[in-house]
Amino acid sequence: MLFKNIDQLKKKQKSFLQLKTINSIEDVDALSELLRYHEHKYYIDNDPQISDYEYDQLYKLLEEAETRNPLWTKSDSPTQRVSSDLTNSLQSVEHLSPMLSLDNTYNLEDLIEFDNRIRKICAIPEGNNVEYLVEPKFDGGSLSVVYENNQLVRAATRGDGIKGEEMTLNARTIRSLPLSADFNSLGIYKTELRGEALIRKNVFEEVNKSRETDGLPLLANPRNAATGVLRVKDPNETASRKLDIFIFQWGYAADKNGNNKIPEYKTQSNCTKTLGELGFKVAKLENKVCKNIQEVHKFITTWAEKRDSYPFELDGMVVKLNDLALQEICGYTSHHPRWAVAYKFQAKQASSTLLHVEFQVGKVGSITPVAKIEPVQLAGVTVSSISLHNEDFIRTKDIWLGDTVLVERAGDVIPYIVKSFPEQRKKSAKPIEFPKNCPSCNTSLLREEDNAAWICPNSQCPAQQVQKLIHHVSKDAMDIDGLGSSLIERFYDLGIIKDMSDIYRLDYTKIAQLEGMGEKSADKLRLSIEKAKANPIHRFLHGLCIHHLGKKISKLIAENLDYVPNLQNWTIENYTNIKDVGPVVGQNIIDFFADKSNLKMIQTMESLGVNLHQKTEDKPKQLTMDAIFSGKTILFTGTLSKMGRKEAEQLAEKNGAKVLSAVSGALNILVVGEDAGSKLSKATKLGTVEILKEDEFLEKVGKNDLL
C-alpha cells in the first residue's frame, strides 16, 4: 500500500485544519504524510479529495511549524520539494531550468506584505512605485516546451520541478502550440517555455455529455479533463479533447554559445509580448502592467467578478515583478520565486459531509431531493443546502447519506455536488431512499416514461398550492412587492390565502394586527396588490403556473389574445399556429381551462379588479423595415448610466433588434457602458461588430418614430 494509516490521518485532517500551530514532531510527520497523500490524489490520480484552499491551509500549517523548529524539517517534507505528478508510465526528462510552484495570497493584506518584501529585498525607497505584470492563473496542467533551432523538440509535465514526464507527441496535437517558431531571428538557438494546457468550458461540457452517453464516469472539472488526457499513451485521444495552451513564462533562452538572452528583454511584459509576436498564445488582452500594488488588487478584483464569463477556468491571478533585473535580485526559495505570487480567488470547490436529505414538492408536483450538508464556505458564501435534482442524479453519482462530497458553486451562484467519495465511505453510511408517497399529502408518486422526476399527481396538494402562490406573486409573474415566500407560507397556514384569487381580497385590517406587520406594512402590501391588478395579461398568464407556460410563451399567446377567458374555446391548432408554441404547452393550457374550478378562480379575480384584457404591452410589435435596428442583433455590456439594462434591451427590441446574451460571430452591435470588460475585448477582436457608446445608442433610437 502506497500510504499507510491513511484512514487514521484523514480523521486528524479536520483537527489539523482547526489548529493554528503544531507543537510536536509526531504531528509534523502525520501532516507531511497527509499532504503527500493529497498531492498524489490530485496530481497522479486526478481525483482530488479536498479543495485547493484546504490543501493550502494544511501546507502553511506545516511550513510554519518547520520554520519555528528547523530540526523538524526532513528532506522528504512536502515543503522541501515542488509537488510531484510523476508516474512510472512515461519517460522522465530533466528541465533546462527548475519549474517551481508559486506562493499563494488571498487578500489585499497578503499582497501588501508581498510588495513590502520586494521593496525590502530590492532596497526600493518608500513612495517609489513598483511595477507588476498581472496575468490569469489558468486552472489546467503545467507544461514545459523546448525549441531547438526553431523546432519543437520536447514537451514535458512539471513533475517534481526538476524532472517531468515527456509527452512530446501529445503536445504536438495541441493546435495552439506552434511546431516551429523563428527564435533564430532573436539570436536564440535553444529555449524552454512554460505554459498551461487547458480545455475550454464548453468543450468540457461536451466531453462529459459524451462520457455520460458512453456510461463512463463524469470528469470533476475542466482541469481533470485537460491533465488526464495529457498523460495518455494515444495522442489521438489527446487530440480529441481539443486542448489549448497559454504560454506564460520564458524559463530558459540561450544562443549557440549558451549565453542567456532573456535579460535583453528588460521586463516580464516584453517577454510576453515577444512570445506573442512569435506566434504563441499568450494572455494579451487578459493581462495588465500595474504601476503599484493597489492597482494590482483593483485589476484582480475586476477579474474575480468576470471570471465566470471567461471561456477557460481561472482559479486566480499571477502577480509578477515586471523588471527582470529586480527579479534576479529577489531570487528564489527552494519552493517558489520570491518575485512572483499567485492571488487565489475564493474557493469554488470544497469537501463536506452529507447529513440528510429533504424531499421538496414543486408547483407542478415534481419531487426534488435537497441535500443538507455540513456548512462550507464557497466563494464567500456559506452553503448548507444543495439540490440533488432527481433520483437518477443520486444513483449516477452514487451518493449516500453520510458521504463526503465535493461541492462546487457553478458560476459562483448555484451550489452543485460534483461527486461523492465512495472510497471514504463509513460503515454508518446509508443509501438515500426515495419516497414512494408525497411528503406533503401522502399521495402515491408517479414517474412517467422518459421523465426523470417523480410527480405528485394531486393538484390540491398543500405543498403544490403554496409553491403556485409563491410563483404567482414572484417578480417574473405578477410582481407583487412585499409578498414574499415566507409571508405566503404564513398566510396559507393561517387560512388567509387558499388560492390565487384570495390574494386580491385580503383583509388588510386583520393583516395589520398580525405580529410583525402593522398598518404601514399592510398598506404597503395593499398598494402593491392594487398595482399588480393592472398588469398586462402576459404576466397574468405566466402567473397561473401552467406547466411549461413560461415568460416567452405567455407573451406570444398574449399577442394573439384579447381576453383571457377566451382561452377556454381555443383548440390545439390555435396554439401551434403561433410560432414557437408547441402542442405540449398548448394541451396543458387546454386542460387548465377545461377545469371549472380554475375558470371560477379566474372569474373571481376579474371581479376583484384583476385585468384580463389585452393592453398595449401585449399587442404585437408592428416593426417596419425602417426600424433603426431592423434585422440587427445587439448586446449590452458594462454599467449604463442613463437607464437600466432591462430598459435598454426593451428599447432595442422596440426598434427592431434581437438581443443576444454573448459575443459571437452573429453579433452586429455592442453597446458599451462604464467598466466594459471582456465582451468589449472579444467584440473588438472580431472586427465585425459595431461598437456604440450609450449616448450614441440613445441618439440613434431618438430619431426613430417608434419611441
Image: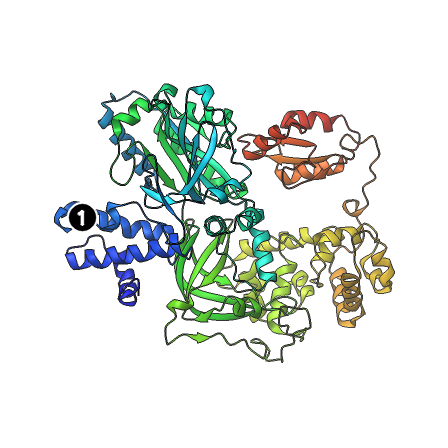
Q: Which picture quadrant has residue 424?
A: bottom left
Q: Position of residue 631 (x, y in %)?
A: 78, 35
Q: Residues within 10 Å of mark 1 (few under 14, many from 20)?
A: some
Q: Nearer the viewer, residue 435 or 488?
A: 435
Scheme of colours in the image: rainbow
Q: Nearer the viewer, residue 327 or 117?
A: 327
Asked whether the viewer can see residue 209, the reply is yes
Q: At 51% from the left edge and 33% from the top edge, which residue is drawn?
A: 281
Q: Position of residue 550 (x, y in %)?
A: 70, 56
Q: At 57% from the left edge and 30% from the top edge, which residue is drawn?
A: 681
Q: Is residue 102 left or right of residue 278?
A: left
Considering only vertical position in the picture, is 628 above or below 73?
A: above
Q: Amino acid at mark 1?
A: Glu
Q: Nearer the viewer, residue 222 or 181?
A: 181
Q: Position of residue 249 (x, y in %)?
A: 40, 32
Asked whether the viewer can see residue 51, the reply is no
Q: At 40% from the left edge and 54% from the top edge, which residue is drawn?
A: 89
Quadrant for the N terminus, please: bottom left
Give the residue pinned by disc 1: 66
Q: Is residue 646 left or right of residue 254?
A: right
Q: Is residue 384 left or right of residue 558?
A: left
Disc 1 secondary structure class: helix
Q: Which picture quadrant has residue 482?
A: bottom right
Quadrant for the C terminus, please: top right
Q: Position of residue 233 (x, y in %)?
A: 48, 52
Q: Nearer the viewer, residue 312 or 578?
A: 312
Query: Count the marks: how many?
Result: 1
Q: At 42% from the left edge and 22% from the top edge, which residue is drawn?
A: 270
Considering only vertical position in the picture, is 179 above or below 527?
A: above
